[in-house]
Amino acid sequence: MELRPATAADLPFLIEMLLEACNWDGTPWYDEVKVRADENAWRYLADWPRATDFGVVAEADGVPAGAAWARLVRGYGYVADDVPELTLGVSPAHRRQGVARAVLSELIAQARAASYKRLSLSVDPDNPARTLYESLGFLKVGVVGTSDTMVLDL
Ligand SMILES: CC(C)(COP(=O)(O)OP(=O)(O)OC[C@H]1O[C@@H](n2cnc3c(N)ncnc32)[C@H](O)[C@@H]1OP(=O)(O)O)[C@@H](O)C(=O)NCCC(=O)NCCS
């Protein structure tokens, strides 16, 4: 597996990963048309990449396998204007091989290098991603709807 910064050319793959996150429980709530039309979902990728966006793509044998990216956005996991919120997804064929842990660890390093003090996210309490976030030090700071807001102090 190789990690590299996410670029403008990664938008189609990031859309795929955003759909994985939106449909995390296996129910196909969203497709690309619907995700682009839903401002609450599309705010995570609208105008990608903005100047303050940053992200990581993992490739396996030259094929994108997973990604994590973060942006300053008033999303579900919003805590403050200066705290980027992250999105994470791994292609079904590449799961349980450490891809999510790798891209997230690199994203955290990018956030530190950019001098951010915190990273936030929103996750359903039943999503297995929650265990990963906890293991990396994210703490629950609130609840929005049925999802937990979690924050990592960098
Ligand atoms: C959640 C997701 C990102 C995990 O990706 P992954 O590459 O398979 O995860 P990793 O192999 O790096 O696993 C990291 C940790 O996550 C947890 N985890 C991941 N998948 C899990 C599963 N199906 N069941 C239980 N724990 C799981 C484990 O704690 C694991 O650590 P371990 O391997 O030491 O047990 C992936 O399943 C996915 O893309 N899901 C849909 C999108 C999504 O839910 N994104 C997050 C939205 S908040």
Image: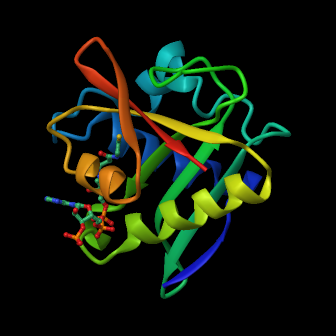
Q: Residue at x 59, y 67 (%)?
A: 106
The colour scheme used to paint the residues is: rainbow
Relative placement, left or right, of 123 versus 7 is: left
Relative placement, left or right, of 31 versus 73 is: left
Q: Position of residue 19 (x, y in %)?
A: 39, 40
Q: Position of residue 46 (x, y in %)?
A: 67, 28
Height in image: 13 above or below 102? Answer: above
Q: Residue at x 55, y 25 (%)?
A: 42
Residue lying farthest to the right in this orientation: 51
Viewer-side residue, 154 vs 69: 154
For the question of whether residue 38 can be seen, the reply is no
Q: Residue at x 28, y 50 (%)?
A: 129
Q: Position of residue 126 (x, y in %)?
A: 14, 38
Height in image: 23 above or below 153? Answer: above
Q: Which image quadrant for residue 21?
A: top left
Q: Which image quadrant for residue 132?
A: bottom left
Number of on-image labels: 0
Q: Residue at x 16, y 34 (%)?
A: 27
